[in-house]
Image (spheres, rainbow, N blue to C red):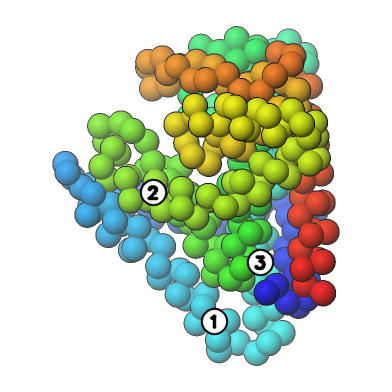
C-alpha cells in the first residue's frame, strides 16, 4: 500500500517536473541512451535473442540495484529526497507538453516544414512526407501514448515499488524505444525488451485509458477502446490511443510512412480530423488525467 510519505515524495517529484521540466544538460537518461547504444553495437549479432536479454540485464539491473542499495543505507530523510528527485528525473510530463506546443505553434502559423521538423523529435515515422493532418495526428498520438509511457506508467510503478520500480520501467521503456523495432537489425535483439516493456506497461496502459475516458468524452472513449484497440499492433498503445482519441472526439491512426516504406494502421477514435487544436486538447487531457491520478493516489495513501 502507498504510504503517505511516499505519496508526498511522488507529489514533490511531479511538482518539480511541472516547475523545472527535464534538465537541459546532463540528463541521466541521455547518458543511459549512450550506454545502451554502446552495448547494442557490441552485442547485437544475427540471431541475438539471448544477446538482447543479456543487454537488458547489463544496462538496467545495475542502476536499479544501486538505487535499492542507496535507499537501504541512506537515512530516512535522504532516502525520501532521493525518491522525490529520482522521480523528477524519471517522468517527462512537462517535456511532453513542450514538444506538443513546439509542433502546434508552426501548424497554427501554416509553417509545415517547421512542424514536420518538430514532430520528428516525437515520433519514428518519416515526417518529411506528412501533410498538416498527418503531422497533427502524429503529435496528438505521441502526446497520448507518451502520457502513458513517460508519466502514468512511472507513477504506477513508483506507487507500487518506489523509485526502483519507476526506474525499472523507465529504463526498459527507453530501451524499447531504441531496440523494439521489427527491422532486420532489431527483430531478434530487441524481442526481450519489447516483451518486458509490454508486461510492465500492461496495467498502467489500461489505467491510463480509463483515465482518458473519465476526463473526456467517457462513452466515446470506452466505445473506441472496446471496438478499435485490438486492431493495433501494440497491446498497450492500442487501448491508450483508442480511448484517448474517443475521449477527444478526434480521428487518429491511419497509414503512415516508416523507414522508407508505408505501414497501414487502423483508424482510431471518432469525430473531427486532427489539427493543431487536437494537440492542445490531448495535452489538456493528460493534465486532467494527472490530476485524477494524484487525487486517487492521495486517497490510497491515507
For the point 50% across and 82% down, the residue is 69
Residue beneath disc 1: 70
Mark 3 closeness class: few <14, some 14–19, many ≥20 residues within 10 Å:
many
Q: Secondary structure at mark 2?
A: helix
Q: Are marks 3 and 1 in contact (CB under 8 Å)?
A: no
Q: Nearer the viewer, residue 219 or 134?
A: 219
Q: Quadrant of the N terminus?
A: bottom right
Residue beneath disc 2: 195
Q: Is residue 189 left or right of residue 130?
A: left
Q: Quadrant of residue 12?
A: bottom right
For the point 38% across and 22% down, the residue is 259
For the point 65% across and 12% down, the residue is 132
In the picture, the disc for residue 106 is: none
Quick check: 117 above or below 58? Answer: above
* Relative image position of residue 109 (x, y in whole percent): 77, 14
Farthest residue to the left: give it: 46
Q: Secondary structure at mark 1?
A: helix
Q: Disc 1 or 2, which lies upstream in sequence?
A: 1
* Relative image position of residue 167 (x, y in whole percent): 54, 63
Residues at marks 1 and 2, CA–CA distance in whole angstroms: 29 Å
For the point 66% across and 41% down, the residue is 209
* Relative image position of residue 302 (x, y in whole percent): 82, 74
Q: Nearer the viewer, residue 291 or 11?
A: 291
In the picture, the disc for residue 159 is: 3
Residues at marks 3 and 2, CA–CA distance in whole angstroms: 22 Å
Query: Which numbered mark, 1 or 2, is in the foreground of this view?
Result: 2
Amino acid at each position: 500500500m502507498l504510504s503517505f510519505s511516499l505519496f508526498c515524495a511522488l507529489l514533490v517529484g511531479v511538482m518539480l517536473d511541472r516547475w523545472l521540466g527535464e534538465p537541459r544538460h546532463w540528463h541521466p537518461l541521455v547518458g543511459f541512451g549512450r550506454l545502451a547504444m554502446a552495448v547494442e553495437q557490441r552485442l547485437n549479432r544475427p540471431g541475438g535473442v539471448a544477446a538482447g536479454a543479456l543487454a537488458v540485464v547489463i544496462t538496467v539491473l545495475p542502476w536499479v540495484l544501486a538505487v535499492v542499495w542507496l535507499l537501504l543505507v541512506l537515512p530516512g530523510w535522504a532516502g525520501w529526497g532521493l525518491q522525490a528527485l529520482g522521480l523528477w528525473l524519471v517522468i517527462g510530463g512537462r517535456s511532453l507538453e513542450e514538444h506538443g506546443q513546439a509542433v502546434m505553434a508552426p501548424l497554427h502559423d501554416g509553417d509545415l516544414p517547421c512542424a514536420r521538423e518538430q514532430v520528428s523529435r516525437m515520433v519514428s515515422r518519416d515526417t518529411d512526407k506528412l501533410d498538416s493532418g498527418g503531422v497533427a495526428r502524429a503529435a496528438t498520438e505521441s502526446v497520448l501514448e507518451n502520457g502513458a509511457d513517460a508519466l502514468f506508467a512511472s507513477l504506477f510503478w513508483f506507487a507500487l515499488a518506489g523509485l526502483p520500480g519507476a526506474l525499472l520501467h523507465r529504463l526498459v521503456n527507453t530501451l524499447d524505444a531504441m531496440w523494439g523495432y521489427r527491422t532486420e537489425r532489431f527483430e531478434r535483439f530487441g524481442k526481450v525488451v519489447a516483451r518486458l516493456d509490454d508486461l510492465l506497461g500492461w496495467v498502467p496502459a489500461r489505467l491510463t485509458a480509463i483515465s482518458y475516458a473519465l476526463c473526456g468524452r467517457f462513452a466515446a472513449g470506452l466505445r473506441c477502446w472496446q471496438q478499435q484497440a485490438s486492431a493495433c499492433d501494440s497491446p498497450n498503445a492500442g487501448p491508450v490511443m483508442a480511448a484517448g482519441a474517443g475521449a477527444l472526439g478526434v480521428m487518429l491512426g491511419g497509414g503512415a510512412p516508416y523507414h522508407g516504406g508505408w505501414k497501414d494502421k487502423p483508424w482510431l477514435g471518432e469525430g473531427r480530423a486532427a489539427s493543431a487544436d487536437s494537440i492542445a486538447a490531448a495535452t489538456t487531457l493528460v493534465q486532467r488525467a494527472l490530476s485524477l491520478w494524484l487525487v486517487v493516489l492521495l486517497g490510497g495513501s491515507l
